[in-house]
Image (spheres, helix red, strand yellow):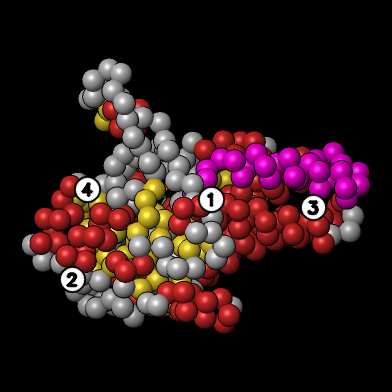
Amino acid sequence: MAEQTKNHSSLRTVDWKDNKVVMIDQTKLPKELVFVEFSDYRQVANSIKTLVVRGAPAIGVSAAFGLALAALQSKATTKDELLKDLETARKILFETRPTAINLKWGLDKIMQVAKQGTDVNQIKELIINTAKKMAEEDIKINMMMGKNGSELVNDNDTIMTHCNAGALATVAYGTALGVIRAANDSGKKIKVIATETRPVQQGSRLTAFELKYDGIDVSLIPDTAVGYTMAKGLVNKIVVGADRILRTGHVFNKIGTYQVALIAKQHKIPFYVAAPLSTFDLKSNPEDVIIEQRNGREVTGLGDKKTAPEGINVINPAFDMTPPELISGIITEKGIAKTPYNESIKKLFEAN
Ligand code: RUB
């Protein structure tokens, strides 16, 4: 536990140990820092569905580890049988959450590797090694992204972030919070304003927890105070994460991101998105992206306390889309894309 918690001066969200997947149970944070272990890929699928693990890159790597478990669980004796078992697991893992493209990225990558293998044992080994490599690379990518993004940050900046795009949304270090960590590590004095992020509270439960854990100055605000803090001049920059970014620069992220971007535009505050290339979907158009609709119970009460009248109809989308004209730049491990996004995003992929 000691190694996991202080790795890269942040938490390690998901790991592979002794042929098991080990995860922080994010539903228990910040009350308890509990690690759960899984040896069945269905448990991993369930953990993605129930938000034990969440955040786009963390979901991608968890799904890859899920397929590694499925490979170990398979009793197949031929390559074809193993690929069939993996396909069953892929489908179950894929159907857990619809919006973050990293889920598909992680699953596709493992299936590709599996198809390249020759015999059952070699494929199993290949899959496990690839999934482990994806986890390690996620940390490296976040650190590169952090370095790229920290150049946009000035000494004494106060940066607003929404939801959790931190160590807990990735394997470690974080995307948006990676930028903040890198700026902080380079000696700049940074303050953070975290929105609580109704209704699942990723801001207050996770972002506030992990920044406090790492000793970074963080203040929590209700989502409804975004306009107030910007109008009062309390924010210099905004950095958020993303669950899917289209080739046009449309960004899908936690519900409320669009409102933050709109208010930032009104107050001429730069609004940045930080995400790895695995979060980009170069094929879909905005109308193709499925926005996850979640249970109304998340909205009708606070914790166990019911606040809304019985039988009320609820609209509870988990994500929204921010259009490119509200975005000052998209920070990736390969550099920062700026408007016109269809050109700059294309260049990032060509350089990759
Ligand atoms: C997570 C969310 C996060 C991005 C972060 O939503 O919207 O901002 O996933 O991604 P949920 P990244 O908690 O419902 O999974 O770390 O790539 O920026």
* Count of residue discs: 4
Mark 1 or 4: in front is 4
The disc, 4 or 3, on the residue closer to the chain's N-terminal end is 3
The residue identified by callout 3 is 124
Q: Disc 1 versus disc 2: distance between alpha carbons?
A: 33 Å
Q: Secondary structure at mark 1?
A: helix
| Residue type highlighted by circle 2 | Lys
Please tell me the numbered disc located at residue 59: 1
Residue 22: percent from left, percent from top? 57, 46
> Tags 2 and 3 in contact by the CB under 8 Å rule?
no
Q: Residue at x 25, y 71 (%)?
A: 270
- State the extent of the magenta-drawn residues as a range: 74-100
- Residue sitting nearer the eye, 283 or 74: 283
Quadrant of the rendered image containing residue 314: top left
Determine the residue positioned at 71% across, 49% down. 68
Dot 1 or dot 2: first in sequence order is 1
Residue sitting at x 21%, y 51%: 220
**Given contact means CB atoms under 8 Å apart, are the residues at marks 2 and 4 in contact?**
no
Q: CA distance from mark 2 to mark 3?
A: 52 Å
Marks 2/4: CA–CA distance: 19 Å
Mark 3 crowdedness (10 Å alpha carbons): few <14, some 14-19, many ≥20 = many
Residue 247: tell me if it is visible. Answer: yes
